[in-house]
Amino acid sequence: MAAGVSLPTPTSPGAIDWSAPWLAPWRGRGQPVAQQVQGGSPVGQALQSAVRGAAPVVFAAQSELPDGVAYEQYIWDTRRVPTRDNLHDFFNGLVWLHFPQAKRRLNELQAQAIAADGVQAVRGPLRDALTVFDENGALLQAPDALWDALRARDWQRLFIDLRPLWPQARLVLFGHALLEKLVAPRKPMVAHVYPAPVAINSGVIGAGDGLGELDAWLAQAVQPHTWAAKPFVPLPVLGVPGWWPANEAPGFYADAQVFRAAPRPGPRP
């Protein structure tokens, strides 16, 4: 194999199965970027080649990040994203390309919190929530009945009784760590899901792209007073109908280690 070409291991873009349904929104721009990386280009350089028009950030080498400077603060101050040659930063860059306004908003709030409180050993509630969504978040556009079942963690109703409703829903993964983990899919993988209105990009639900309106909406939806409370719902993503062949068997959802019951409310004071 030629020098600089990535081997198809779980840590390189060559390992990505672009036919996976959760990668539909990322395939058009992500696959050419992956091919450039496999051809020997640094990840940051390959991502930069996919930028269209004015972009909120530039993808830079990881070596540009000065010692002792917080990553999020550096991005906010310089509009440059330090990028390593690995899958984690590859997917982070793809999310920046598709959700530039939302990523900029998350970065803004992270930088504000760092400026106010510094980098603590334990993140505060808002920074923790922003990080959870940035790493493992997803947006779900779905009929109310599906949302009611998901919030109740009524997996039988959500995935079996209401299965005919899923063609009316769209789950868009946002977290770059989750996208990285799904290169080698495992049943327990969970997204932290936030509700998005069905009307946004309603003409392309299920089509896998058309994320511009969703990006603009999410950038406005991220507000400190609500997000600090982590308004997310856990969803085992391989349970989504059409996303994993094994979930066609009803017994797939009987695994209580993955499809867990809702926590019982604590005792009243």
Image (cartoon, grey):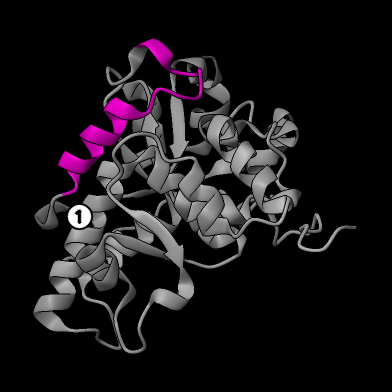
Quarter of the rendering containing residue 172: top left
Asked whether the viewer can see residue 102, the reply is: yes
Q: Position of residue 264 (x, y in %)?
A: 35, 58
Question: What range of the chain is rendered magenta?
Answer: 203-222
- 108, above or below 221, in the image: below
Kind of element beneath mark 1:
helix
Is residue 149 found left or right of 115 in the rendered image?
right
Q: Position of residue 92 (x, y in %)?
A: 46, 54
Is residue 90 or residue 159 the one in the foreground?
90
Residue with the mark numbered 1? 227
Q: Residues within 10 Å of mark 1 (few under 14, many from 20)?
A: some
Residue drawn at 28 percent across, 62 percent down: 129
Residue drawn at 46 percent across, 52 percent down: 93
Quarter of the rendering containing residue 74: bottom left
Residue drawn at 27 percent across, 17 percent down: 199
Is residue 146 or residue 111 the one in the foreground?
111
Question: Any magenta on residue 174?
Answer: no
Is residue 197 found left or right of 29 in the rendered image?
left
Residue drawn at 40 percent across, 27 percent down: 146
Asked whether the viewer can see residue 261, the reply is: no
Disc 1 marks a residue whose amino acid type is Trp
